[in-house]
Amino acid sequence: MLGSSSQRIGVVRSYPRKSQIIREDDPADHVYEVVSGTVCTCKMLREGRRQIAGFYFAGDIFGLESAKKHSVAVEAITNAQVRICKKRALTALASSNLEVADRLLALTTRELARKQDHLLLLLSTTAEERIIRFLIDMVQRGSPREDNLINLPMARRDIADYVGLTLETVSRVLWDFERRGAIEISGRHSIVLRNQFTNGRGERPAELFEGVKARRPQTEEELQEWLVSPEGKAATLFNLTSCLAGAREHGPDNRRMD
């Protein structure tokens, strides 16, 4: 992600699945780039529950915060290779290389946006809405194949710790989505999206809006704002119209982990 320049100042290390890359309160004097595999940032809460703060895939950067110590730990979700660069060396490189400086700024901005999205996910009212937001994020970051299959390298427990739900609730919601025809569960680490356009439905945006909201959009501006919202993205990306409507009918899910 930082280009060939980072390769000259960094070293690549391998980490087996479930191993710890960074411990909480370790000195924050390095920046890390995922070369291969998947890692996560996480924190153990007082009640003994793990909260995953983010997933990082090949090309993603973590450790950009300016704090002196890491506030979260980092674990390998799968076997992973990570390039480790000293912050001081990277800062010096950025001061003399405008391209690297621009990339660092873009990466920092993207990381802040992801943290905001994760906060909004945790504030979602129902379990269904949390899982939908998670799936949207995975779709946008994972670029589904032509057969609409998207890989989920993390385990169900990892997903539960990310969305703030129990393992049982995550499994129930995913199976319910499959029953409704929104997704197909393909093994333990992948799902197939039931994209409405590939299924021959191909509704126009206004029809999608009406299918979820049970009314027509009042203005074109309202329609456009809805299309870029998590709800609109879900309805556009895959056949989740019935799931979105069902989430509202069922109301808040009391089985979430508070």
Image (spheres, helix red, strand yellow):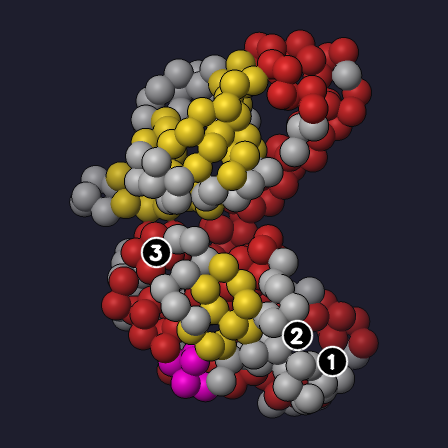
Question: Would residue 225 be seen by someone viewing this image from the given angle?
Answer: yes
Q: Give the image location of residue 60, x and y in percent.
A: 57, 38
Q: Nearer the viewer, mark 1 or mark 2?
A: 2
- Left or right: where does residue 161 sit relative to residue 96? left
Q: Main secondary structure of the magenta part?
A: helix
Pointers 3 and 2 in contact (C-beta within 8 Å): no
- Left or right: where does residue 157 sit relative to residue 223? left
Q: Give the image location of residue 227, x and y in percent.
A: 70, 70
Q: Is residue 114 above or below residue 43?
A: below
Q: In the image as oriented, which residue stretches furthest toward the left?
A: 47
- Left or right: where does residue 198 sit relative to residue 66? right
Residue 236, numbered circle: 2
| Callout 2 secondary element | helix
Give the residues in magenta: 176-180
Judging by the rendered image, the residue that carries numbered circle 1 is: 205
Residue plotted at (37% across, 27% down)? 22
Disc with the residue nearer the chain's start (3 vs 1)? 3
